[in-house]
Image: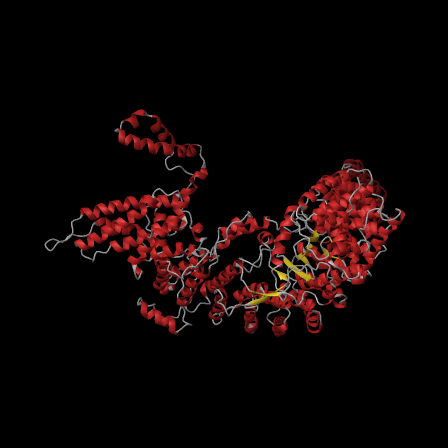
Amino acid sequence: MINAVLVFNNNGQPRLTKFYTQIDVPLQQRLISQIFSLVSTRASTACNFLPLPPLLANASSSNTRSTWSHTAPSSSEPLTLLYRHYATLYFIIISDSLESPLGLLDLIQVFVQALDQLFENVCELDLIFNFEMLHATLEEMIVGGCVVETDLARIVKGVREQTRAVKGDKGRDRGGAGGGMLGNVGMGIGRGGFMGGDLVWSGR
Amino acid sequence: MFEKSLYDLIRGIRSHKGNERQYVLDSLKECRNEAKSQDLDIKATAILKLIYLDMFGHDMSWASFHTLEVMSAPKFRQKRIGYLAAVQSFRIDTDVLMLTTNLMKKDLTSGSVPEMSLAINGLAHIASPSLARDLSPDLVSKLSHSSPNIRKKAVLVLYKCFLQSPELLRTCWPKLRECLNDEDPSVVSATVNVVCELARRNPKNYLPLAPQLFKLLLEQGNNWMTIKLIKLFATLTPLEPRLIKKLIPPITNLIRTTTAMSLLYECINGLIEGGLLAGISNSVDAEELASVCVMKLRGFLVEGDSNLKYVGLVALTKLVATHPHLVNQHQDVILECIDDTDISIRYRALELAVGMVDVDSLPGVVTKLMRQLKPSKNGDQEYVELEGAEEDEDEDDMEDDVIHPSRSTRGKVVALELPDDYKRSVIEGILEMCRRDMYANIADFEWYLDVLVQLVRFVPPVQRSEEEDEEIVQAGKDVSDDIGFELRNVAVRVRIVRPEAVRCAELLLSRRDGIFPSAGGGGLRVLGPAAWIAGEYASLLPNPHATFDYLLSPLSTTLPPAILSIYIQAASKIYSSLTSSLKIPWDPARKSTLTLLTDRLITFLTPLASSPHLEVQERAVEFLELFRLGLEAIQGQPASTDKETYDPPLLLTQAVPSLFIGQELNPVAPGAQRKVPLPPGLDLGDFINPDLASLLASADHDPALTEAYDPEDSKFAKFYFEKAKPLISATGFGYRSSLVPASQKIDSAAAGSYQSSPGPDVDQDPEAVARKRRERRERNRDDPFYIFTPGDVSDGEIDAIPIMELKLDEGEIPPNLAAAKNKVKRKPKERVEIAADEGIDGDEDGNGNGDDVAPAAVKGRKKKGLLQVDSTALEGFSLDDTEEKERDRKEVERSRREVERLRREMEAAAKRVQEQKEVESGAVGQEKVKKGKKKKVEAEGDGDKKVKKKKKVKEGEQTEGGEKPKKKKKKKKKVKSAEEESEEVEKVVE
């Protein structure tokens, strides 16, 4: 199964964190920063597999280091860490051996394509301000760590259905009291506000 | 006060550059207040902001109750926020979890599909055992929902519920199984996915599905599902080898025809992992199939796509265990990957190379790897293109990249800096490939020693334990330990190169420039084994005086205590070999040389005698005393003059050497020691002197005994008695485990301990003496440096001791070292004697790691990976359609028998009443009770008794019902089936 899906930008700021196993927030943050430090030094021509960060390498008997024994203990399954880099964002998937690594790389591609269709030319800002939608899209694809849908059209349809439901009760609600959380309402302003500057998060 | 929306929050953070932290803390405070608001909109917005901040590490678990409130909001928008918050922040121990049951039940049965999928999705994350139990009926009903979207999600969430409460698997399985026939491919795919996950935990349950799954595989809808099916079959085939034959054709077909690389790869992977290739390895087809796989994998390596290269190497690494010859054919491309610019690929290639090397390729591969370790000089540095990490065009849209992902042209070229971790892996890899199968791949041990010495130079600095506590464990280990271990191993096991090994040790001890890394202080830990070699084989040292100097240099005192204590021992051994010679005449020159040597040793040891490290201190104190005596002896013995000749002092020629010289040290299998049998008649729990405790106690208290000695002696006596006290009390209470060390002592003495000069034997048991003699004889005969004639060894022992096969014409290796040296060099293929571990009779696990590894493995099992799902409950959990059913059936049988027993009692009672009238019927009735089938027949023959019997049966049922009203549901069902059975009887009777 898939253990986690992470999205962060070139500065290591998380844009989406989804762990399919319950782990504590500080640990999540440490894991993200470890993965980021690994992924940010990758060459553009390098393959999309990452060696396991120390946090994971110690826990599961990693296949990258130290254990050369051919009889790997069956209980702790080796994890695979995959990433894809699109413009300013890294998409990371951590999975176990029951998932096909190449298939997961395609899955990231489908994910990004779905986002692209939903946002029309998706960019990082879309994802920042619409992280609910981001989550919804992911939920259409992966439920509880298992891939549920890989068909682009059906994913997009599923998300749109939800969005309609939200808009539905927004209509009842005399129009958007919650602020520009959905759709492209806030995007123009968002773009303006974030032009040419990187969000530096020192509080992390 | 106007509440901030999420949008305001994000902008606010942006605009407070420099003190975001303060801003965020303020915002968190606001959220805290807003979350308490009565207005659900405000509350929901607050929660949404909290989710956002949670992503950055600001835990929102405190808001779980507010989350719950938002989850139960009527508006979908708010509900969605609530569910998202729950998914992100609820844990299994969140206390409001139990309050969600009704809410989720309501949402699951909601009419709107989005709401339902929210609840289903939420449950996938927050399922707890009780939630799983309470909500599973609703989920099962969702399996037949009209929307495939709901169906497919429900299937997956059921799996999550199974993880929480495995017994649900039994009740839900039939429904879940039907989903394999769903008309919607996504639902089928999801079901296959779940079965695949379940099968990994207990494949046996899912074997009956094989035909159905096989059909799905043949129909080959979507690649994603086909991959899952192949993975599923790979877990099933080990249990059902007959599947292999069936699976080979379709998979072969897929391999030949598919265009999807992922599918192709998974097919090959499935063949390897499922043991399919190994399973049919004896046929010609299999060989062909395997070579097709390898050819396809070669295609992966040369394709140019780095991802394919990576997975290709992974697959080859798995394949090399079963088909080394096929993999070996593609050494050319594989070895190219070792020098790939991508570190991930290098790791894989390294791993593969370790498994792949043979005698011929080893030197080449090692040279290649060594070249990587060498610090690159200017000019031939490797360059890699880095992805521009400092892009600030955040608003760049990703469309282009969607089409051409991850291959952006911008970036800069930087020198490839190999991380220390990788260097460490390379060194470990080199050592591993060299030492595998007891140095089977090494033709030239001098070359190997040379490699080892060179490797020391490349050892990266020792890993400092950073703030991470997990790394401390790793920091204790260093590759230079491994190198040292190898060095010592070769020195001990391969006698023919021992002089060379000793020379290497001397070289290392000299710590000349260029031997150790110039910076970082790595590799120093090789010095411990090096010192040990120099000390143990001091007689082979080319330059013992120099080595002695190296060991005693002031630099040595800065070494880690573990190494320093070895140094002390080694220096003493070298001293002993230098001084013990009887041949050198005891003239004034000799006398002053030895005085000098002893003096130096004493000067070296004196400060160490007050070392804070106990091991160092103890050794230093002991040897200090010894060498002070030695110095006295040297000075006390007059030197020979022309007129008179004196012998060198006995202390130096006899006493000191006897400390170090004994029988040769041989490698002993780790498990061998434990297998030394306890001599018969030795009861370790028995007191040697049953009265010892009281004897000592009385001695302790009796002033007459202690005071009798003179004051000096009584001090000693007191000292010893006081020390002995705890021991006395321990044995006095019959504390048996305190005797364990004694048993170990006996064991170690028997199993050839250090320098094995068995002290005076305490036990005079003739059996034990004979055994000891036998062992001693065996040890000598068994000396792996010699060929022993198999004639005088019992068969069991021959099997137990792993021995290198030797060519007879080769004869004994001549002790002439120069000749041996040449021999090895000229004929690299020549067999070199390598001492194997010594074992004891019946030592099946030759290297003895069986006992040692097992506990470690158990420990490892307990340690759960960080991201791993706890699925132990599902492991070995069987479905009702296999053995569970069997068990149930037995239970049914038992209750049936119970019913029949009662019936029999009733019948017996009735019989007694009717005995006078109808004798025959009683006999028939009794027989009937024994078995159902029999009874039927009997009953048929007993037609005229039908009315009576019916009544009896009825009575039996009543008793059954009356006696066990408290039985659980399950039991009731069984009783019911028993009732059905009796009804059947009734029918037959009628």
Image quadrant occupied by the N terminus of chain B: top right
Residue B576, given in percent of the width and then of the height, sits at: 28, 53
Decide if residue A163 is on the left or right side of residue B572.
right
Structure colour scheme? secondary structure
Q: Residue at x 71, y 73 (%)?
A: B257
Residue closer to the observer: B31 or B623? B31
Q: Is residue B314 above or below residue B39?
A: below
Residue B541, given in percent of the width and then of the height, sits at: 31, 60
Decide if residue A197 is on the left or right side of residue B370.
right
Q: Residue at x 40, y 44 (%)?
A: B613
Residue situated furthest top in the rendering: B703
Q: Is residue B548 above or below residue B976?
A: below
Decide if residue A20 is on the left or right side of residue B113.
left
Count of numbered tags:
0
Residue B840 in sight in this render: no
Residue B574, given in percent of the width and then of the height, sits at: 30, 54
Residue closer to the observer: B822 or B397? B397
Q: Is residue B916 above or below residue A130?
A: above
Residue closer to the observer: A95 or A182? A182
Decide if residue A194 is on the left or right side of residue B775.
right
Residue closer to the observer: B945 or B810? B810
Residue situated furthest left in the rendering: B643
Residue B513, given in percent of the width and then of the height, sits at: 39, 61
Q: Is residue A86 above or below residue B871?
A: below
Residue A70 in sight in this render: yes
